[in-house]
Image (cartoon, rainbow, N blue to C red):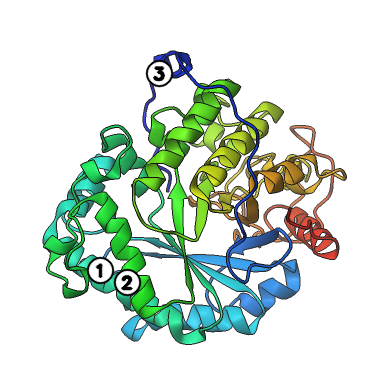
Amino acid sequence: MHGRIPLVAALLVALTIGAAPATAVAKLPPKPAGWPATLQLGLKDDPGSAAATRKKFRTGLRYQYLAGGVNTGGGWSTWNPGGAYVSNYVRESVKAGMLPVLTYYNLRHSKPGAGVADEMRGVLRNLADPATMRAYYGDVALALRRAAVVRPKAVVLHVEPDLWGYVQQAAENDDAATVTAAVAGSGVAALRGLPDTAAGFAQALVRLRDAHAPNVRLAYHLSDWGTRVDLHLNRPNGAQTDALARRAAAFERSLGARFDLLFTDWADADSGFEQKIRGDGGASWWAPADFTRASRFLGGVVRGTGMRAIVWQLPLGNTVMRAMDDTWGHFRDNRVQTLLDDGRRRVLKRMARAGVVGLLFGGGADGTTNASDWNRDGVTNPPRVFGRTRDSYNADDDGGFFQQLSRRYARDPLRLP
């Protein structure tokens, strides 16, 4: 899952013209109600694994997708009878002392838009279809009711990654009220009076949450490419990055709906995967300037929207362990070590100052690196290529690197500003 589109570098020039200078840094917004005092780590984690994951990694968060579409006959609500998949997942998370995060990703998979090759067109078509959205709101309400089984314990519902970026691109002047969506027009009685726009859609989500599961923290997804400028691929300068952050925050405010958390993603696959499997020529590798730019942009959006942030679906590859040889399940990346293997915690502290309260790790494509023995190939120590020198600690596909770092972090977690 990651909806990038070709971008026009000339837009950067337009952004520079008349861009206001960066203002003094404002205070951070408050943490979500009940959030721990320290920056939390988490993993993508399958049902039934909460206790084992907690014991092995000492992480405080875990996440899983709710996907498959709302009118396809194979959506998440069918994975266990009556939507019990959600209640089972949140119960076992809470029992293990972990906060459950559910990524609700269904609009792309639903009919009729699922049959449209262009993802943006397919998503926007579904958003405007009354029958599809009637089924959608019912599906969301079911997920919320199932998540309420642990109230007052908190559950995070992360809503529709990529959707908001597509809506911003379709909007006039970054105004969500200019994009059509079936809300009151869907015929759902609980949504009467709401406008049939993307802003009304966001307001509908909040209304349904308030009615069914006040313990749920709703999370909005920030896609930096919603501005049509990709932070990493286009590498805007500081003033341009600040201007993009202002635009992204203004778009979120145009929804007129109060979300609790801001999610964002930097990639859906390891840089080695992007280079070898998707053939990007190495364009996905991050340098120190990319981490600086990402934290600057995110800090601006956090302050502009009044929401703290979680960086989600971070790749699990590394460039340290011999297991990482850019074969299936063992692809390299440098984000885990940059964030967690620096004794001075320079990037981690910068992210916390920007407003980040959590980091969630897990690839978004088959074949990306995993922090378990997903490949079922046991302990792997292939020939030392790419300058990797460290023998595997265990059979995990990343050589056990994330386990070592997460357990070390748990002994001395970073206190949030």
Task: Tell me if residue 370 comes above or below residue 265 in the rendering.
Answer: below
Residue linked to disc 2: 208
Kindly identify the residue that appears in the image at 22 percent across and 43 percent down: 179
What amino acid is at disc 2? Answer: Leu
Residue 324 rendering spot, x and y as whole percentages: 70, 44
Kindly identify the residue that appears in the image at 72 percent across and 41 percent down: 350
Residue linked to disc 1: 137
Mark 2 and 3 residues: CB-CB less than 8 Å, in contact? Answer: no
The crowding category of the residue bearing disc 3, from other C-alpha atoms within 10 Å (few below 14, some 14 to 19, many at least 20), is: few
What amino acid is at disc 1? Answer: Tyr
What amino acid is at disc 3? Answer: Leu
Q: CA distance from mark 2 to mark 3?
A: 38 Å
Q: CA distance from mark 1 to mark 2?
A: 8 Å
* Mark sitting on residue 11: 3
Q: Do we see residue 100 in this rendering?
A: yes
Residue 334 versus residue 255: which sits nearer the camera? 255
Q: Secondary structure at mark 3?
A: helix
Residue 205 versus residue 142: which sits nearer the camera? 205
Residue 67 rendering spot, x and y as whole percentages: 36, 63
Q: Do we see residue 373 in this rendering?
A: no
Kindly identify the residue that appears in the image at 25 percent across and 56 percent down: 200
Mark 1 and 3 residues: CB-CB less than 8 Å, in contact? Answer: no
Q: Secondary structure at mark 2?
A: helix
Residue 156 rendering spot, x and y as whole percentages: 50, 67
N-terminal of the pair, mark 1 or mark 2, is 1
In the figure, residue 77 lies in which quadrant? bottom left
The crowding category of the residue bearing disc 2, from other C-alpha atoms within 10 Å (few below 14, some 14 to 19, many at least 20), is: many
Q: Secondary structure at mark 1?
A: helix
Kindly identify the residue that appears in the image at 78 percent across and 42 percent down: 320
The crowding category of the residue bearing disc 1, from other C-alpha atoms within 10 Å (few below 14, some 14 to 19, many at least 20), is: many
